[in-house]
Image (cartoon, rainbow, N blue to C red):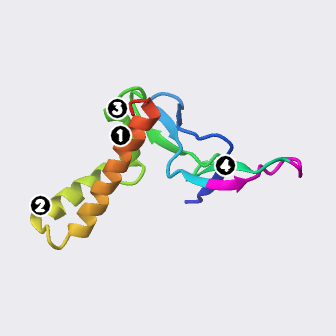
């Protein structure tokens, strides 16, 4: 899958895209002293916000039935990295052999915490 990184002058969040989908801007990276490509030579450098995703705008298409619902938003972000089958496998691995799958479990939980934090930010809950 081709990934595109795009930098913007303002931070991005998400927007609704058709029925039960959103375009989310994930993995924000702050770029200090950034100049837009079309900026005049004497324009001051600003802070930029970069996002990487499969869309040309750096966004990621995510399933989301209700973009104003916190739980739906968290699930959509989690799905950007883990399918439901992968998520269930991680749970089974950890339950059956927690020592062997400790790193996988911690990585999964860290991403879930990221998803919750990002969803709160996007929805203005924070």
Q: Mark 2 highlights which residue?
A: 95
* Residue at horizontal 59 percent and vertical 59 percent from the top: 2
Query: Do the numbered discs 1 and 4 sit on residues whose CB atoms are within 8 Å?
Result: no
- What residue span does the magenta drawing correspond to? 31-42
**Residue 24 or 31: which is nearer the viewer?**
31
Q: Secondary structure at mark 1?
A: helix
Residue 85 rendering spot, x and y as whole percentages: 28, 53
Disc 1: which residue = 74
The residues tagged by marks 1 and 2 sit, at their Cα atoms, a distance apart of 23 Å
User: How far is mark 2 from mark 4, CA to CA?
Assistant: 44 Å
At label 2, counting other C-alpha atoms closer than 10 Å, the crowd grade (few under 14, some 14-19, many 20 or more) is few
Q: Which residue is tagged 3?
A: 70
Of 11 and 104, the residue lying toward us: 11
Badge 4 marks a residue whose secondary structure is: strand
Q: Residue at x 34, y 32 (%)?
A: 70
Mark 3 in CB contact with mark 1 (< 8 angstroms):
yes
Query: Distance of mark 3 from mark 2, alpha carbons?
Result: 27 Å
Read off the residue under disc 4.
Answer: 47
Residue 75: name its quadrant: top left
Q: How dense is the environment of label 1, judged by Cα within 10 Å: few (below 14), some, or many (20 and up)? A: many
């Amino acid at each position: 899958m081709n990934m595109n990184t795009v930098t913007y002058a303002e931070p991005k969040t998400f927007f609704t895209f058709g029925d039960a989908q959103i375009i989310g801007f994930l993995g924000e990276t702050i770029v200090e002293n950034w100049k837009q490509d079309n900026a005049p030579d004497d324009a001051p450098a600003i802070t930029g916000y970069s996002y990487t995703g499969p869309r040309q705008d750096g966004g990621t298409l995510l399933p989301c039935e209700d973009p104003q619902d916190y739980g739906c938003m968290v699930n959509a972000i989690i799905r950007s990295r883990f399918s439901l089958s992968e998520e269930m496998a991680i749970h089974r691995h950890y339950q059956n052999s927690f020592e062997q799958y400790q790193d996988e479990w911690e990585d999964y939980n860290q991403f879930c915490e990221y998803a919750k934090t990002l969803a709160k930010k996007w929805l203005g809950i924070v």
